[in-house]
Image: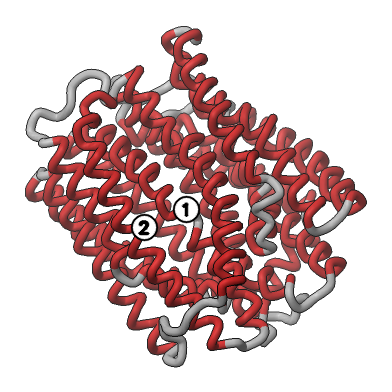
Amino acid sequence: MKLDFVKNTKRNVVASFVNKAVAMLFPFFRKTLFMWVLGPGYLGLNGLLYSILGMLMLAELGFGTAIVCYMYKPVAEDDKKLLCAYLKFFRTVYRCVGSAIFVVGLCLLPFLRRLIHGDIPADVNLHLVFLLHLCNTSASYFLFAYRGSILGAHHRNDILTHIRTVTSVIEFGTIALVLYFTHNYYHYVLVTILFTLLNNIMLVYATRRMFPDLVPEGALPQEEVKRVVSDVKAIFMHKVGSVVSHSFDNVVISSFLGLVAVAAYNNYHCISLAVAGIPTAICYSMTGGFGNKIHTESKEENFKLLMKVNRLIICIVIWCTAMLLALYQPFMIIWTGGKEGLIRHFMTPLLLVIWFYEKQSRETLRMFKNAASLWQQDRWKAVIASFANLALNILFINVFPEEYKLDGVIFATLLTDVVIQMPWESYAVFSGFFGRQEAKKYWLAQVGYLVLAVIMAILAWNTVSLVPWDGPRGFLIKGFVSAAVSSTLLVVLFREDVFELLKSLKGKNVN
């Protein structure tokens, strides 16, 4: 069964943009509530606990990613028996994962206090709060999270995204009321558990209604199990790299600099992550379609599509980069109210902007690599990069001057990405699926995009620096100026792409 790539992508993109708007605004509002209602200590504690739980989720190993990608072929061949077998296998795996996460989490309880430098909020029982978060993390694995694979394999991520959007909106409203009226961190955690259950109930209802004939039954053939397990080993190595390189940053900062530094880092980082949601949403919307095309079209057609999508993503990334550099620090000053310890010097947002561009400019390549199941080729990349990043974190946080120690953590991650992750990742895609000629075309284009990004970012920042006003009024004027400059340059440099995108959004026939 050949899926409608354009139609499904449009649906997924619309759903993803709505969801990303929610995902950008609500964490920002939640952090604001934490800062002003509970205080920076609670904000830092919450970030640390989420980072620890992120590491525990390594127990998932990558089965979710592998099984969705293996489902692309039976979907293309309309093999429902094999899809049902994959679903049953996935359910069994996730129940084991949920148990493993809970047990390992319990083993960490005696060591939690050692991960925090300095004081913790006086009215918080660290072990009880961690247990509640642990139950919330384990719950989805025991319930119906595995059924999301059906939607991903059929390129219908829009359904899953709508569910997340609806539950997120209601959840945030409930959290805001609870924190405002009770000022109680425990109530906040209990609300998150309640909405994890609600999200799972809505997911199982939607999948049973859309695909009533896909139920977890049957035995997966042994050769399929071996293939999945083989790839899962590689995916697990990638996940180790992702968790250690990013989530573990909070643990290092907490251990050496304290919870307020964790809060400052998370505040700055969440802005770039929120903006990164824009290109990520588009790529996420296309992954299932790419997976289907890999099994139904030629390599030449796939490379043309890769380059076209990459150019579209780069247009957005360049615009976001220029806007981020121009508005990062003014926004942070207004948002935090200049609270002590939460505002950093200009080097912090500058490094985060560079990291943002480096990471998002290869989003399309990572999407294709996952869709094509190319995990074996660079499985050691993540492990080597993670250990290098951890070592550099500790080195830089010890040798950098006091005011630049936090920047050392960011610089360590950026350095390992550029030196290890990016070239190895590219090698995996072009040696495992395409070829040298395609690699040359891709990287020549990427160098050209980088030059344009630097020019646009510098012009936007210099233009905004001419605005003499501060505060909310000054920020609005700076935002208007930077948007005008960046958008004008974008239209001049990528005129055909912008017009084609607008035609597509209007529903006209565009390939």
What percent of the width, then of the height, locates residue 54?
A: 38, 45
Q: Is residue 267 left or right of residue 436?
A: left
Of 496 and 295, nearer the camera is 295
Q: Residue furthest bottom?
A: 213
Q: Position of residue 102 (x, y in %)?
A: 26, 51
**Front-most of residues 325 and 145:** 145
**Residue 357 on image: x %, y %:** 63, 40
Find residue 202 and name its label. Answer: none
Element under disc 1: loop
Work out whether residue 466 can be spotted.
Answer: yes
Residue under pointer 1: 61
Residue where numbered disc 2 is placed: 97
Placement of 66 over or under 342, stated as above or below: below
Quarter of the figure with the C terminus = bottom right
Circles 1 and 2 in contact, beta carbons < 8 Å: yes
Identity of the amino acid at label 2?
Val
- Residue at image position (38%, 24%) is 253
Protein image colouring? secondary structure
Q: Amino acid at mark 1?
A: Leu
Q: In the rendered image of this protein, does residue 189 appear above or below residue 263? A: below
Specify the quadrant of the image occupied by residue 184. Answer: top left
Q: In the picture, residue 126 is in which quadrant? A: top left
- Helix, strand, or loop for circle 2? helix
* Residue 324 in the image, given as x and y percentages of width and height: 55, 38
Going 52% across and 21% down the picture, which residue do you hit?
391
Q: Quadrant of the N terminus?
A: bottom right
